C-alpha cells in the first residue's frame, strides 16, 4: 500500500537526556512538532548521538497495537524481522502513516544493550527510551439552513470532513440552493429583509451564521426573570442567546451577559420564563462567538438571496372598479407584496400598489385586496385567467454564497444559516 509523504520540519518533542561518558551515547531523541493530519502522511524521527552509537528501533500504533514494518512501510498484522530495525546508527528516520479518520498515536521505541556498548542518556532506563507522535482525527461540519418558527424546513446545504488541525481553506458553495418550505395551505410566503431596488434579490452575511448547543437543564423555575440557574454551565460563553425553552423557540433570543460558574447561573439581557428541569438551548451567532464556543473558524462571501417570481391568475372576471381580485390560489402571497396586472389604475405610482390583505390563504381559491390603486373593470373587463404578477414575496427561496472553514472542531458539528435573519415571513394583512 502506498502513502503520500508530507514535508516535515524537524523540531522539538523530546525525551530529556543527560550527559554520559565512557560509552557511545544517544543523547537526544525527537519527533517533529508539525501536527500530523488525519490523512496519510509522514513524520520524522531524529536520533542524535555519538557516531558509533548503535540501537534498535520499532514503532507501535496505539489503535490496534500493530508494529511498523520497515520493509513495506505499513503497520502489519504480524510481527516479523522487518518490525524492528537492528543495529542502526544516529540519524533521521521517516515513518509513513496511513489515514486515520479517528486519529491515532504512534509510539517510537528505541532500544540498546551492553553488547552495543551504547547507552541512552536517560535517568529512567539507560537502554530504553520512547517518544510518541499524535495523529489528529477528522471531524465533519454539516451546514444547514434553518428557519425556527417559520415554514422554512431544515435544508442541508453540504458537508465537509477534514482533520481538526487542518489550516487550509475548505468551502461549501451554494449556487441558487432552494430552501425547503412546508407544503401547506397556510403559507404566506417570505420577504427578503435586506433588499434594494429589486425586491426579489437581497443580501445576507456572517451574522446569520450560528451554532446551537446541546441540552442544558434548568435547576429551579423562573418567571419573567433574567437570572437562570442550570445544572451546569460548562461550554457556555457570554454572548450566547437562549433559542429554545422546553422545545419552544424563543424569538427574542435573550443573550447571556454574565456567567457565574460557582453557582451555575447565567444572567440574561431580558426576561424569560421557565420551569424546573426545562431543557434550554443556546445559540452562538457570528464567526467570533462560534470560534470561541467550539473552535470553528469560518467566513462567508459572495452571498445573496433570491425569490422566484410568483404569477397567479384571475379566478372570476372583473367587470367593475374594485380593489379585490379573486385568484386561483393565494399560497406564497403575503400582505405588502407589490402587484402588477392589466387594468390596474395606480393612485400615484404603479410601484406603490401593494397587497393589503390575503383572504383566505388557499391552494386554488382566495382573494387579495390591494391598496394604492384599483382595477378599472368597468372600463375594460379583466378576464378569467389574466395573469397577476407578485413582486417581493414568494414561497420559493434560493441561497447563494460561500461558507469558508479554516479550522475544524474537535467533534462533528452542525453549523446553521438562520433564515430568520435573512427573510421575513409574510402575513395575511398589512
Image: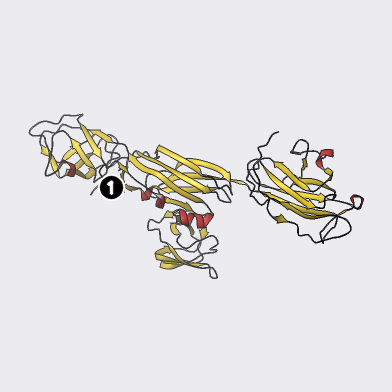
Residue drawn at x 11%, y 34% is 377
Question: Relative to residue 120, is residue 262 depicted above or below?
Answer: below
219 relative position to 3: left or right: left
Specify the quadrant of the image occupied by residue 326.
top left
Q: Locate residue 155 relative to residue 413 in the image: left or right.
A: left
**In the displayed structure, does residue 147 sit left or right of residue 57?**
left
Question: Residue 129, position in %: x, y?
Answer: 80, 54
Viewer-proximal residue among 90 and 266? 90
Tell me the residue at 53%/67% (across/down). Answer: 264
Residue sitting at the far front = 51
Whole-percent x and y of residue 246?
Answer: 46, 57
In terms of depth relative to the viewer, which is nearer, 271 or 248? 271
Q: Is residue 80 visible?
A: no
Residue 101 in the image, given as x and y percentages of width and height: 63, 43
- Is residue 162 among what the camera can see? yes
The residue labelled by disc 1 is 427
- Give the farthest residue toward the right: 115
Q: Nearer the viewer, residue 225 or 177?
A: 177
Quadrant in the picture for the N terminus: top right
**Residue farthest to the bottom?**
262
**Is the residue marked by circle 1 packed among few (<14), some (14-19), or many (20+) residues within 10 Å?**
some
Amino acid at each position: 500500500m502506498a502513502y503520500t509523504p508530507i514535508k516535515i520540519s524537524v523540531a522539538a518533542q523530546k525525551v530529556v537526556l543527560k550527559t554520559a561518558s565512557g560509552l557511545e551515547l544517544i543523547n537526544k531523541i525527537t519527533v517533529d512538532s508539525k501536527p500530523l493530519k488525519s490523512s496519510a502522511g509522514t513524520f520524522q524521527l531524529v536520533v542524535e548521538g555519538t557516531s558509533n552509537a548503535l540501537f534498535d528501533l520499532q514503532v507501535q500504533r496505539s489503535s490496534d497495537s500493530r508494529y511498523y514494518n520497515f520493509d513495506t512501510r505499513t503497520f502489519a498484522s504480524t510481527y516479523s524481522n522487518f518490525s524492528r530495525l537492528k543495529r542502526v546508527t544516529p540519524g533521521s528516520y521517516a515513518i509513513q502513516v496511513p489515514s486515520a479518520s479517528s486519529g491515532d498515536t504512534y509510539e517510537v521505541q528505541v532500544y540498546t544493550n551492553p553488547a552495543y556498548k551504547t547507552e541512552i542518556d536517560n535517568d529512567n532506563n539507560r537502554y530504553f527510551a520512547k517518544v510518541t507522535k499524535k495523529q489528529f482525527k477528522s471531524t465533519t461540519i454539516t451546514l444547514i439552513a434553518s428557519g425556527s418558527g417559520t415554514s422554512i424546513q431544515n435544508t442541508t446545504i453540504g458537508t465537509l470532513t477534514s482533520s481538526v488541525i487542518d489550516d487550509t481553506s475548505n468551502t461549501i458553495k451554494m449556487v441558487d440552493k432552494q430552501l425547503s418550505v412546508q407544503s401547506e395551505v397556510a403559507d404566506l410566503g417570505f420577504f427578503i429583509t435586506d433588499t434594494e431596488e429589486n425586491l426579489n434579490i437581497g443580501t445576507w452575511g456572517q451574522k446569520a451564521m450560528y451554532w446551537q448547543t446541546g441540552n442544558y437543564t434548568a435547576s429551579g423555575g423562573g418567571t419573567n426573570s433574567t437570572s437562570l440557574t442550570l445544572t451546569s454551565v460548562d461550554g457556555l460563553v457570554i454572548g450566547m442567546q437562549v433559542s429554545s425553552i422546553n422545545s419552544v423557540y424563543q424569538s427574542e433570543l435573550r443573550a447571556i451577559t454574565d456567567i457565574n460558574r460557582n453557582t451555575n447561573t447565567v444572567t440574561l439581557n431580558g426576561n424569560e420564563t421557565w420551569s424546573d428541569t426545562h431543557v434550554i438551548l443556546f445559540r452562538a451567532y457570528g464567526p467570533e462567538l462560534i470560534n470561541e464556543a467550539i473552535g470553528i473558524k469560518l467566513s462567508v462571501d459572495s452571498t445573496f438571496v433570491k425569490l422566484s417570481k410568483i404569477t397567479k391568475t384571475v379566478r372570476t372576471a372583473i367587470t367593475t372598479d374594485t380593489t379585490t381580485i379573486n385568484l386561483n390560489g393565494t399560497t406564497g402571497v403575503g400582505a405588502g407584496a407589490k402587484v402588477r396586472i392589466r387594468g390596474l389604475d395606480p393612485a400615484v405610482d404603479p410601484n406603490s400598489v401593494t397587497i393589503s390583505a390575503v383572504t383566505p390563504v388557499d391552494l386554488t381559491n382566495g382573494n387579495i385586496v390591494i391598496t394604492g390603486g384599483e382595477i378599472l373593470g368597468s372600463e375594460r373587463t379583466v378576464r378569467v385567467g389574466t395573469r397577476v404578477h407578485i413582486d417581493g414575496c414568494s414561497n420559493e427561496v434560493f441561497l447563494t454564497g460561500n461558507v469558508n472553514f479554516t479550522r475544524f472542531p474537535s467533534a462533528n458539528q452542525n453549523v446553521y444559516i438562520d433564515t430568520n435573519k435573512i427573510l421575513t415571513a409574510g402575513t395575511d394583512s398589512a
